[in-house]
Amino acid sequence: MIGDIHQRVTRSSVNSLAFFSHSAYVASFEPRDVSDALSDPKWVNAMHEELENFERNHIWDLVEPPPNCRPIGTKWGFENKQGEDGMVARNKARLVAQGFCQKEGIDYEETFAPVARLEAIRILLAFAASKGFKLQQMDVKSAFLNGFIEEEVYVGQPPGFESARFTDRVYKLRKALYGLKQAPRAWHARLKSFLLKSGFVMGSVDKTLFLLSRDGDTLIVQIYVDDIIFGGSSHALVSSFAEQMSKEFEMSLMGELQFFLGLQIKQGLEGTFVHQAKYTRDILKKFNMGDSKPMTTPMSTNTALDADEDGEAVDQKEF
């Protein structure tokens, strides 16, 4: 262990090129388990950041376990968030509940929450391009921690961060935790309630689409869990919405929409261009084909093909 896990690691400044300065703030590897993460100060910082989000959002209270209490276990998940260039942008440590231990009717009731389809995102891109909207993107930090739960749920203390004084205590949840079966539904209900109170109208077919009309201007918002795409005919209306969301939730304003659900998006005066260059590079790298010679037709152009009169018919749609 490097240092005290109960204290965040102080980051020292690095006077060097941008790459080396950036690498001083993030780790390039993904830990195998908690002990592996605790051996690196950058991942310790990421874990502290997650627990600090819990404190700010008043997620839970450390209490004596009630009689016959069987708390739900918790575990850490680790992921390196990459930018469009493929470089590690930040280390994300997430504490999740082991929802497979929950029992229906006791720990949760309803779990369904609508999620935007990829086709809906493409339609929104086409609509914005036709209207000349500049789409923006924002991300809700620890979105599921904003959802209120109605059930009485207890979880165990975070591995590696157990209280030295109260080892036998458990956390009673006030709000949803990642991994809980009702967490997506609780978050969507909270966000939907806020948008409707703010004057938005929810789509009759797509329940993740919200529309606001004010003084002849239009603002359109598409939700994909904790990622929000928005744009409108008025810059003032768009800025007002971003400010309103930042006051209600802890947000990361990411600016113009450029990378979403594996799609790389370029918005310009000539229109909107959508491609998947990074996805293609990742696939080639996965199968060790990064240095392969590109071909417009994936076979020899000199091959002569004849109809197989004796062959079996195949379903062309399958290919």
Image: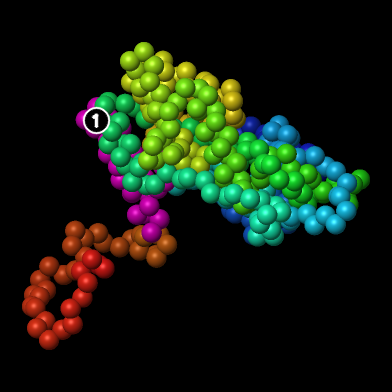
Residue 310: x and y, percent?
12, 86
* Residue at screen point 50% across, 28% down: 195
Front-lying residue, 308 or 268: 308
In the figure, residue 212 lies in which quadrant? top left
Question: Could you say which quadrant of the image residue 280 lies in?
Answer: bottom left
Which residue appears at 60% of the width and 30% of the height?
250
User: In the rendered structure, does residue 118 fall within the stretch colored magenta?
Assistant: no
Rendering quarter of residue 247: top right
Indicate whether 227 appears above or below 33: above
Q: Residue furthest right?
A: 165
Residue extent of the magenta highlight: 259-283
Q: Nearer the viewer, residue 66 or 311?
A: 66
Q: Which residue is mark 1?
A: 130
Query: Percent position (x, y) of residue 312?
Result: 18, 82
Q: Is residue 23 left or right of residue 290?
A: right
- For residue 53, side relative to residue 207 (left or right): right
x then y, percent, for residue 73:
74, 56
